[in-house]
Amino acid sequence: DAGVTQSPTHLIKTRGQQVTLRCSPKSGHDTVSWYQQALGQGPQFIFQYYEEEERQRGNFPDRFSGHQFPNYSSELNVNALLLGDSALYLCASSWPGSPTQETQYFGPGTRLLVL
Amino acid sequence: AQTVTQSQPEMSVQEAETVTLSCTYDTSENNYYLFWYKQPPSRQMILVIRQEAYKQQNATENRFSVNFQKAAKSFSLKISDSQLGDTAMYFCAFDFGNEKLTFGTGTRLTIIP
């Protein structure tokens, strides 16, 4: 049973650049959520995708956008990178049809460093 | 506002001992879900245990158990017979009925050989 996968594992960008992070959900899952985890902090919710639509969004600017594909995989895009965007970006998947529908399973994360 | 507080930034315990990690929260919701996640140095966030707020019985998973006090808005994690592999950051997290997780700031747990 394949778990949540993310790519790349590490990424270095400079201020003002754009970045795309990728996530494949756990087998059988159709809902993908993205979280940002700054160093020494707990993860913060960015947004959630279901049926290729953004279903809800946290308190993040429009520079953060996403997409979900028909195979349920997802991308997180960040434009005009700032130094403060340096963080671990976590993808989590879930399946609303399961008995434990509220349980989210996380990928290994992408570490983004903005210089 | 819904808040989650972990008041123990760091803890350490000898191998094979029992340790309890604390978590308190604030919400006006009645139905919600509570979780403890473990994040080892590998960064992978791993689900340890889950609890439904409408269930009075405390959840257990092998050496891990919770003490859920709904009225006090407290949700602690007890690790029995601690092992070196339990060394990690531990986060309590909540789904307050809106299908997104709200996390605490974490407790760094070190198991000493």
Image (cartoon, grey):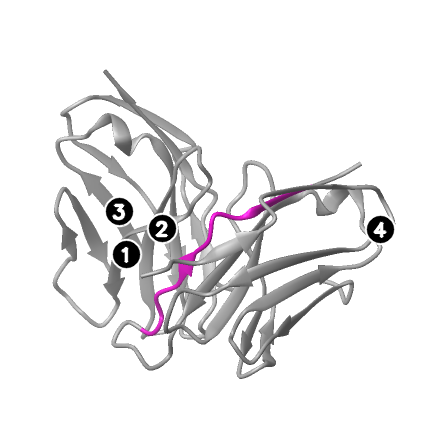
Q: Position of residue A67 (x, y in %)?
A: 65, 73
Contact check, label 1 and label 4, Cβ < 8 Å: no
Cα–Cα gap, marks 2 and 4:
39 Å
The amino acid type found where label 3 is placed reads: Ser
User: Bounds of the magenta span?
Assistant: A101-112
Contact check, label 2 and label 1, Cβ < 8 Å: yes
- Asked if residue A15 lies left or right of residue B19, the reply is right
Residue A41 appears in which quarter of the rendering? Answer: top right
Report the front residue among A67 and B78.
Answer: A67
The amino acid type found where label 1 is placed reads: Ala
Q: Which residue is mark 4?
A: A17
Is the same chain shared between marks 2 and 4? no
Q: Which residue is mark 1?
A: B72
Q: Which residue is mark 2?
A: B24
Mark 1 neighbour class, 10 Å CA radius: few under 14, some 14 to 19, many 20 or more: few
Residue at 63% over, 65% down: A75
Is the same chain shared between marks 2 and 3? yes
- Asked if residue B89 lies left or right of residue B63, the reply is right
- Asked if residue A56 lies left or right of residue A108, the reply is right
Q: Is residue B55 above or below residue B92?
A: below
Q: Which residue is mark 3?
A: B76
Mark 2 neighbour class, 10 Å CA radius: few under 14, some 14 to 19, many 20 or more: some
Tell me the chain of label 3: B
Cα–Cα gap, marks 2 and 1:
8 Å
The first of marks 2 and 1 along the sequence is 2
Tell me the chain of label 2: B
Cα–Cα gap, marks 3 and 1:
11 Å
Is the same chain shared between marks 4 and 3? no
Q: Position of residue B74 (x, y in %)?
A: 29, 53
The amino acid type found where label 4 is placed reads: Gln
Contact check, label 2 and label 4, Cβ < 8 Å: no
Q: Position of residue A28 (x, y in %)?
A: 37, 73
